Image: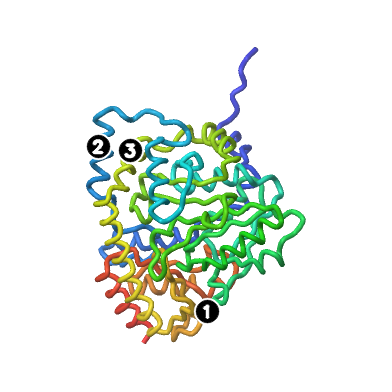
Amino acid sequence: MQAIHPNPAQAARALQAAQRVDAIEPFRVMEMVKAAAAMRADGIDVISMSVGEPDFTAPDMVAQAAMDAIKSGATQYTESLGLSALREAIAGHYRACGLDIDPRRIIVTAGASAGLLLACAALVSEGDQVLMPDPCYPCNRHFVTAFGGKPILLPSGADERYQLTAAMADAAWGERTRGVLVASPSNPTGTSMTPQQTRDLLAAVRARGGFAIVDEIYQGLSYDEKPVSALSFGDDVITVNSFSKYFNMTGWRLGWLVVPDSLVPTFEKLAQNLFICAPTIAQYAALACFKPEAIAIFEARRLEFQRRRDFLVPALRELGFSIPVTPDGAFYVYADIAGLNHPLASDSSAFGMAVLKDAHVAIVPGDDFGFAAPERHVRFSYATQYERIEQAVERLGRILR
């Protein structure tokens, strides 16, 4: 029988993406990134306050551990749950914070994103609703959508520290609601849930038989109070963490989950099928992160982030930005622009482009982070050098005064 070879153009037109993809929105901020890149290509000095990535990279001892692994041939697959030595080291890190976490419950993942994908794959069924605050990191809601769930964003303001509260969850919980997904500290707001907020929210979810996924990837970058993990309030919580932020290993793609003991086989099965394992070289490198001399470096860098925040927040307020809650973690400031002396202060996207064009400073409009007045908000990242932040404030002052 003669094979049929369709016209390639016709075949391409016939291919259609899965319907769920229609509900996943692109990162609008990429338009800003592309515009900034084009300006730099033209020789214009653009200060980036848009990227959510530490300007610090992995310390030398971490890089050396990776090279040692390569030289010794330790580059093959690990078990899907991660290197036993790394899971033990992570458990030791929790012990230093006063938490006794069984290494068996720790699952090493290919970044926090893979951890969140695994959590949603394990817990979200078709049509399930998952509650989260608005504003929030856009990928969190898209992870839920990717597995057929429906993210329900609940407007959260300064009174709630831009976080999901027990009262909000109780009021919104419906027949199809299955759980909550929160982040503390949060992207884009840099605000954390208070211990009492966390305790109350988990109690409310537990009373309804729901699940709680808590993204704690920025918890190492906390400034005003010692952070309290959601793991302090029960063994039924799923937490997500990462080597990207506090440990400055963004491109290494390494994170971890802590899950209830009863769910470890479920997560292991999914990890085996979806990822096989996290990057082996990155896992060996991460072992060096827990050396005392490495922790000393990370702590010094955390204090440098705090120094930047302590300059930037009052400086922005002086320029007219409204920041009703001082961010206590991560490296973000979520600022209200409605009161600014600027003709585009009612449209964060247009304002962001104007700031890029006129002040040569790249920031992020609120559009990506939800539906609660995004046109009034912009996000600043202070993951850039202190001197550059000073220059950015000076440039902003020129166009706002």
x 70%, y 45%: residue: 126
Say which of marks 3 and 1 sits in front: 3
Residue under the point 29% across and 66% down = 304
Callout in the foreground (3, 2):
3
Q: Which residue is mark 2?
A: 67
**Residue 301: x, y in percent?**
29, 61
What secondary structure is found at the residue carrying circle 3? helix
Q: Residue 355: x percent and y percent?
A: 39, 74
User: Which dot, 2 or 1, sits closer to the camera?
Assistant: 2
Q: Is residue 18 above or below residue 332?
A: above
- The amino acid type, in three-letter code, at marker 2 is Met
Q: Position of residue 363 (x, y in %)?
A: 40, 68
> Separation of disc 3 and disc 2 at Cα?
9 Å
Residue 147 seen by the camera: yes
Mark 3 — residue? 284
Residue at numbered disc 1? 346
Residue at x 31%, y 41% (from the top left corner) = 285
Dot 3, how many residues are within 10 Å of its Cα: few (below 14), some (14-19), or many (20+)?
many
Q: Amino acid at mark 3?
A: Tyr
Q: Residue furthest right?
A: 175
Badge 1 marks a residue whose secondary structure is loop
Mark 2 crowdedness (10 Å alpha carbons): few <14, some 14-19, many ≥20:
some
Mark earlier in primary sequence (3, 2): 2
Tell me the element at label 2. Answer: helix
Residue 51, position in %: x, y?
A: 38, 60
Residue 34 visible to the viewer: no
- 340 up-or-down from 295: above or below: below
How packed mark 1 is, by other alpha carbons closer than 10 Å (few <14, some 14-19, many 20 or more), is: some
The amino acid type found where label 1 is placed reads Ser
Q: Quadrant of the C terminus?
A: bottom left
The image quadrant of residue 354 is bottom left
